[in-house]
Amino acid sequence: MNAIWLIMIAASMLYGLCTGKVDMLNGVLLNIGKETFDFVLPLLCMTCFWNGILNIAKEAGLLKKLEHLFHPFLKFLFKDIRDDEETLGYIATNITVNMFGLGSAATPMGLKAMEGMQKHNPQPDTATRSMVTFLVLNTAGVTLLSTTIIAMRTSFHSLDAVGFMPYAVAATVFASAVGLLVDRWWNYRD
Amino acid sequence: MTEITVYILPVLVLVIFLYALVKGVNAYASFSDGVKEGLHLFSSVYPALLAMMCAISLLRESGLMELSSQLIAKGIPYIPSEIVPMILFRPVSGNASLAVLIDIFKTCGVDSMQGIMASIIQGSTDTTFYVISLYFSTVGIRKIRNSLTIGLIADAAGIGMAILLTILFFQ
């Protein structure tokens, strides 16, 4: 990340200076701090609100309900750790929390799930099949409610801030399905 | 479709509140707790986003983004050149693609085809490189097998589907 960032900025400076865009570069350098702040602030307020709403769902046990729905499906997907209820629980929570677009809340659960799977790993420096499946599910990122994007579209005064959602859900479900199928086909041939 | 989607959020809130009512949860307290957690996000989101916004604004203002996007867009049909940086950054960094999304909202408009396409792409996958490096490094795994390849295949499928759906329903 560091190298990409350095190169992006250095290359832009060099290209901008060579093509005579020095005024525009100055504009960015002097205003970007406030511009980003002005944008992050409304976004943060929206996120705080939804964090509050979803926290009610969590404490009322609604997320737990969802996790139970996934359980049979997860037992089938993660054959290698079928008997480890605790780890399966972490996986279920991670996926459920991710579905509601709370990525940062999902990460600690995901890490616990990884530690759980590592306990069953015969070669501790190599990924197990379950780990690959879990990461494929995570990187495809099944998200049903993208609160950040909705918040952002609202702060830009969109006439239809939530209209994109069904399509995003379709795309994310498709990505996960493709990921899972490739994983099955590639890693579970025996 | 628009008529149905406006009901998603109110109905979701209704379901959560009814459920909390039935379960007798102290919803007021858990709401405040959730908001408090959200406030902590600022100190981690602002620095990362500022770094990316700065780099992407400079790329755009210097003209380098336009130049490289047009070069790449020539190779891929049907994709507006503004979307190219989105596709490149989405698997690498969540904050970078968020910064590109803001940039597209600013230059093309939030309800333009580019704006909608970028929103769907942002929602269609997660940051593959970040998730894989974080999760594997935490438990000390160095041989990640084919997880990165499969993750990127899934990303390509999600982004491709996002572009296809936008062209079909929003053009």
Image (cartoon, coloured by chain):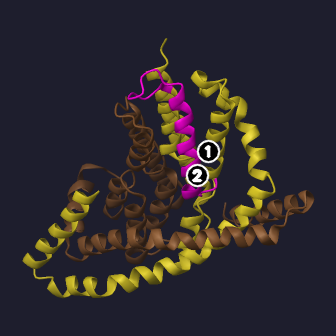
Amino acid type at image mark 2: Ala
* Residues shaded magenta: A100-129
Q: In the image, is residue B52 above or below residue B94?
A: below
Dots 1, 2 in contact, CB < 8 A: yes
Q: Is residue B139 left or right of residue A96?
A: left
Disc 2: which chain? A
Residue A95: mark in rendering: 1
Which chain is rendered yellow in the image?
Answer: A
- Residue drawn at x 84%, y 66% is B26
The residue that label 2 is drawn on is: A106
Residue A137 visible somewhere in the drawing: yes
Q: Is residue B41 left or right of residue A8?
A: right
Q: Where is residue A84 in the image (x, y as percent from the top left)?
A: 65, 28
> Residue B99's image quarter?
bottom left
Which of discs 1 and 2 lies nearer the camera? The answer is 2
As helix, strand or loop, the secondary structure at mark 2 comes to helix
Magenta span includes A114: yes
Colour of chain B as rendered: brown
Label 1 to label 2: alpha-carbon separation: 7 Å
Q: Quadrant of residue A29?
A: bottom left
Q: Residue A52: x percent and y percent? A: 70, 68
Q: Which of marks 1 and 2 is nearer the N terminus?
A: 1
